[in-house]
Image (cartoon, rainbow, N blue to C red):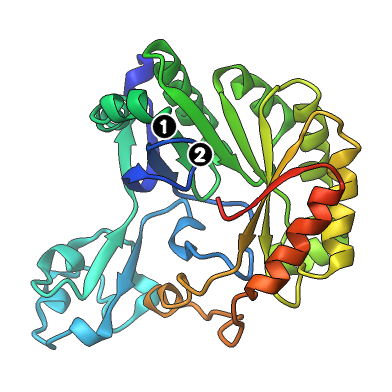
Amino acid sequence: MSSKEIQGSIFDIMRYAIHDGPGIRTTVFFKGCPLHCWWCHNPESQRVQQEIIIRPERCHSCGDCRKACLNNAINHKENCTSCGRCAKACLFNARELVGRTVSVGEAIKEIEKDIIFFDQSGGGATFSGGEPLMQPAFLQALLESCREKEIHTVVETCGFARHDLINKIKDSVNLFLYDLKILDSKEHEKYTGVNNKLILENLKNLAGSHRNVVVRIPVIPGINDSRDCIMAIGHFVSSLKTINEIHLLPYHKAGAGKYPLAGRTYILSDLEPPGEEKMLDLKNILEQLGFKTQIGG
């Protein structure tokens, strides 16, 4: 099998993205993530498998989905295999199959459409998710294809992956956008589902071998927005010596409405985004530690 035939699971390819790295970018969103952050704004990215989301307000009770389903899953959700037959049958888009399998060649073809904009803006391709490193062969083949075509590459990662997987791809990545949520291990596990030991170790290793890593901190009120929490992250990153830029990403509620569509509960439904004063205060803390700091991606 050639590298262009390698396949992966994605849930979107977004063109003209401007918040996923420098310039105008095409962002490929990988499906699947080892973390389950309480504030995740892409819950449809968490599972590698395809899944059906339902918009009840669009349903006209025509019964076409029930006729199309071979497993009686409309009445019994546990029987659903996410085959997508119900979504294809629905004329009102009340059901949607999220996730699709694409080859490296197909994804690169989409990315290449915007090369002229990459060249003009200093942009390129960004691989996001979910977590791209959950599909390492697919990610590596995409990165190598981009390098052959001299397309700038960004990988957005939570850092929860085997050391060797990061080492295999790092030379094909122009910029890593590396998320740090919480420095305290127990708190990190509570709010994301995983211990952060591997994440911190990977960042240490990456900082010692890659020249372009930006740390990003999602600022979640009541969880990691205290001065002490941000200060702790800042001191840790300072100890790595080679990382000089941190982005603060204020919490937003854009993903809250997606949870019921996928039959899930959004834990932080009453949480409000942090105010401008709070964000500027946290920005000031990191700037005093010597970091180039910006609010937003």
60 is higher (above) or lower (below) than 70: below
Residue at image x 49%, y 36%? 22
- Mark nearer the N terminus (1 vs 2): 2
Secondary structure found at label 2: loop
Would you identify the image quadrant in which residue 248 lies? bottom right
Report x, y in % for residue 180. Answer: 73, 51
Q: Nearer the viewer, residue 230 or 180?
A: 230
Q: Nearer the viewer, residue 243 or 13?
A: 243
78 is higher (above) or lower (below) than 177: below
Residue at image x 41%, y 31%? 123
Report x, y in % for residue 280. Answer: 71, 64
Counting other residues with Cα less than 10 Å from the Cα at mark 1, is it few (<14), some (14-19), or many (20 or more)?
many
Badge 1 is on which residue? 125
Report x, y in % for residue 29. Answer: 42, 46
Task: Please tell me the numbered disc located at residue 162.
Answer: none
Q: Nearer the viewer, residue 269 or 101?
A: 269
Q: Nearer the viewer, residue 230 or 277?
A: 277
Badge 2 is on which residue? 21
Counting other residues with Cα less than 10 Å from the Cα at mark 2, is it few (<14), some (14-19), or many (20 or more)?
many
Q: Quadrant of the N terminus?
A: top left
Kind of residue at disc 2: Gly
Residue at image x 61%, y 65%? 250
Marks 1, 2: nearer the viewer:
2
159 is higher (above) or lower (below) than 123: below
